[in-house]
Image (spheres, grey):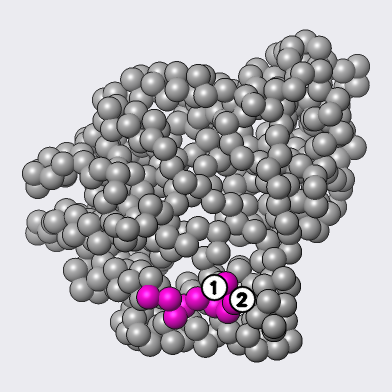
């Protein structure tokens, strides 16, 4: 009985599938008020947002917009939330983490979009090719970009070892095998098989989906055999095969995962959203072509999940004094203004036909950098997606997971010891938060 109560206490929201729509006609949205909309986003300005803002401003001389960039990390998101709560300087904001989005909804930072959706002249819900989750029966965001997760691979390195591009259905064990083969040392220089980025969570979510840390009884699920498999693979990458870029080097020298890949120090990189970094040659003139493989699964008998399916969650600040104008911007951006973002490898949720043409145009334009056929296959695939729910303990358990896996990677404890610590600390946290033991 207590387990069922715990599950109910853990789940802080009940979702239903909702739709969204966008109005038509840029000129119809021009208002008489000379306001400047503050648009906060975590995408670097030079990779699309400035072009979006410039186009909007040309079309709307009496409703100008300003893009304010925040780093999409914990510090940057805290800066955004402080600005929202203060009531100063945020009209529209773009989110990238569903759990942060749901926390903001629960905290009253986000304006419901339903009145604006209902006032639109046409029902264009079917044109957005993504599931939109509701909170308390209301719609609080519209997803602007469609996301398909995959593994970026240095194709020249792959050709060098005589391996084909992995196909749908490959596993994380296959990934570790390939990483070992791709690892190469010449003199003092080592090319590691894989960059060091979010591999623990990538493996976990690809298998568990929404309920990554909890079983059906409301307990932490670190006694699930799949978690042992995840840690064994990670331990192999870092400590047995030494095929992952060293975590300590990444942290002490602050070498971002995409930098590890683009500089040729790592041959594989998780995260297709990083194609924009491959495209940008201002920092690294990489001499290799990038191909892509679908996200691996943990076991061959489980189809797995491919991330959230959508991103760039467009929302209105509940403290905005320009809510109608903010909606005007969002509906235009979703339906028409996103085109500039497609120039940098972010593709729209709006209208699947446009999506396919944007994908083809982008990779054809940059065919010197990308394996065009491989990327077309990836984006044409059929995948299962998931969306996190607002569970209070999740963020704290993530920190516990990071803390304990770092100890394992630094060889201070074994995978077995790590699992025991994860289970013990997570269940203690659940007891502390909810007042009883699961």
Q: What kind of element bears circle 1?
A: loop
Q: What kind of element bears circle 2?
A: loop
Q: Which mark is residue 233?
A: none
**Looking at the picture, how far across and down is residue 318, in whole percent?**
85, 45
For the C terminus, the quadrant is bottom right
Against 291, residue 295 (above or below) is: below
Against 426, residue 320 (above or below) is: above
User: How far apart, in angstroms, are the residues tagged by discs 2 and 1?
Assistant: 6 Å
Comparing 63 with 402, the one in front is: 402
Q: Which mark is residue 218?
A: 2
**Counting other residues with Cα less than 10 Å from the Cα at mark 1, is it few (<14), some (14-19), or many (20 or more)?**
some
Comparing 94 with 69, the one in front is: 94
Q: Residue at x 80, y 45 (%)?
A: 138
Residue 294, image quadrant: top left
**Looking at the picture, how far across and down is residue 95, in whole percent?**
64, 46
Residue 9, image quadrant: bottom right
Comparing 121 with 62, the one in front is: 121
For the record, the magenta segment spans 215-225
Give yes or no for residue 333 being in the magenta stretch. no
Give the dominant element type of the magenta stretch: helix, strand or loop. Answer: loop
Against 117, residue 252 (above or below) is: below
**Looking at the picture, how far across and down is residue 260, in whole percent?**
32, 52
**Counting other residues with Cα less than 10 Å from the Cα at mark 2, is it few (<14), some (14-19), or many (20 or more)?**
many
For the N terminus, the quadrant is bottom right
Residue 159, image quadrant: top left
Q: From the viewer's perspective, tell me whether residue 438 is left or right of residue 31.
A: left
User: Can you identify the residue that label 1 sits on?
Assistant: 215
Q: Residue at x 70, y 34 (%)?
A: 19
- Residue 382 seen: yes
Do residues under tags 2 and 1 come within 8 Å of each other at their CB atoms?
yes
């Amino acid at each position: 009985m207590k387990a069922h109560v715990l599950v109910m206490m853990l789940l802080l929201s009940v979702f239903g599938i909702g739709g969204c729509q966008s109005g038509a006609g840029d000129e119809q949205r021009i208002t008489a008020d000379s306001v400047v909309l503050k648009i906060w986003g975590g995408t670097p300005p030079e990779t699309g947002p400035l072009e979006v803002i410039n186009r909007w401003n040309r079309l709307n001389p009496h409703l100008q917009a300003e893009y304010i960039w925040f780093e999409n990390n914990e510090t940057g998101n805290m800066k955004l939330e402080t600005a929202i709560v203060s009531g100063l300087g945020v009209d529209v904001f773009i989110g990238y983490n569903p759990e942060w989005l749901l926390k903001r909804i629960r905290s009253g930072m986000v304006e419901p979009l339903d009145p604006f959706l209902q006032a639109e002249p046409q029902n264009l819900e079917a044109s957005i090719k993504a599931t939109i989750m509701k909170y308390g029966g209301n719609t609080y965001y519209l997803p602007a970009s469609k996301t398909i997760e995959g593994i970026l691979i240095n194709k020249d390195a792959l050709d060098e070892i005589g391996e084909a591009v992995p196909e749908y259905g490959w596993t994380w064990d296959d990934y570790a095998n390939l990483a070992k083969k791709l690892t190469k040392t010449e003199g003092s220089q080592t090319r590691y098989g894989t960059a060091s980025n979010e591999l623990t969570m990538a493996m976990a979510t690809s298998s568990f989906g929404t309920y990554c840390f909890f079983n059906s009884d409301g307990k932490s699920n670190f006694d699930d055999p799949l978690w042992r498999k995840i840690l064994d693979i990670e331990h192999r990458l870092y400590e047995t095969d030494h095929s992952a870029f060293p975590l300590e080097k990444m942290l002490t020298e602050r070498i971002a995962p995409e930098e590890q890949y683009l500089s040729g120090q790592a041959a594989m990189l998780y995260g297709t959203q990083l194609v924009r970094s491959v495209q940008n040659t201002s920092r690294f003139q990489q001499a290799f072509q990038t191909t892509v493989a679908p996200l691996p699964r943990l076991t061959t008998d489980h189809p797995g999940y491919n991330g959230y399916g959508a991103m760039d969650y467009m929302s209105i600040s509940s403290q905005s004094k320009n809510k109608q104008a903010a909606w005007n911007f969002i509906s235009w951006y979703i339906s028409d203004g996103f085109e500039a973002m497609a120039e940098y490898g972010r593709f729209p949720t709006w209208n699947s036909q446009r999506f396919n043409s944007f994908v083809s145009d982008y990779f054809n334009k940059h065919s010197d950098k990308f394996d065009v056929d491989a990327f077309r296959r990836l984006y044409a695939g059929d995948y299962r997606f998931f969306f996190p729910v607002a569970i209070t303990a999740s963020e704290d358990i993530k920190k516990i997971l990071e803390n304990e896996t770092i100890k394992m990677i630094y060889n201070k404890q074994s995978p077995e010891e790590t699992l025991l610590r994860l289970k013990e600390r997570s269940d203690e946290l659940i007891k502390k938060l909810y007042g009883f033991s699961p």
